[in-house]
Amino acid sequence: MTQMTTATATEVGQVPWAIKGELILNCNCTVFCPCVVSLGKHAPTEGYCQAWAGVRIDSGHYGDEDLSGLNVGLVLEIPGLMARGNWKAAAYIDERASDAAFDALVNIFSGAARGTTGLFKVLVSEFLGAERSPVEFTTEGNARRLMVGKKIQGEVVPVPGHGGQDIVVTNTEYWMGPDITVATATQGRVRAFGRVWDFDGRSAEICQIDWKGPR
């Protein structure tokens, strides 16, 4: 990860920002991810976590820079317990973003901007990079799709519960948001940064997000 000067780091960590929208995530867990309830104190079902995620920003800003309407794709790799850190992460930033918005989103998703995503700065030991890409986040019926060229191709759908209603884990302390819809991936393909992952049929999550910083 690029090292910043003290002055730059202080300035970035003081910029007010906010994002509202939706996040989807698909990981290699064979059943619903235990991190949601255990808050990272329980190991993933396979002992380690490999995941892709997509964020649709319905409204947002970083300082005076508007982030509304932009999308972000993420690749995450965690060697064991989520709470123990040593994560690797990479970001794909919507190619429609202005230069200022691109920098803002890198600051937010690297944790440098503090606030909700500030835990990334603590937990991520290696930031693999951020690239401009065509990041498409679409919804059709109850299916959510994230397409980042051939790098990430994913689709998740809620797991139906009683009466066909979505199963939602509510009132959690999970960092993404308190209410997590239990989902599964109908497609979960990653070909990025040397990773070759296929997580069709594995655990997925859908979450309405309301993030902000720097506090």
Image: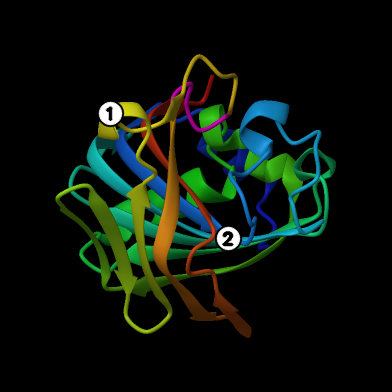
Q: Identify the image quadrant of residue 145.
A: bottom left
Q: Which mark is residue 145?
A: none
Front residue of 119 and 208: 208
Q: Nearer the viewer, mark 2 or mark 1?
A: 1
Residue 163's label in the rendered image is 1
- Amino acid type shown at disc 2: Ala
Residue visible at 47% across and 26% down? 177
Task: Please indicate, yes or no, whether residue 202 appears anywhere in the rendered image.
Answer: yes
Q: What separation in Å lies between label 2 and label 1 (alpha carbons)?
A: 30 Å
- Residue 67 in the image, given as x and y percentages of width and height: 25, 44
Was residue 181 drawn as part of the magenta stretch in this picture? no
Q: Nearer the viewer, residue 198 or 165?
A: 165
Look at the image and tell me whether residue 64 can be seen. Answer: no
| Residue 202 point in image, percent of width and height | 54, 60
Q: Which residues are magenta?
A: 175-179
Give me the residue at 48% from left, 21% from top.
178
Q: Residue at x 44, y 24 (%)?
A: 179
Task: Write down the quadrant of residue 160 in the picture.
Answer: top left
Is residue 107 shown left or right of residue 142? right
Hey, what amino acid is under mark 1?
A: Gly
Q: Which is nearer the eye, 125 or 80?
A: 80
Depth order, front residue of 70/98: 70
Q: Secondary structure at mark 2?
A: strand
Secondary structure found at label 1: helix
| Residue, disc 2 | 51
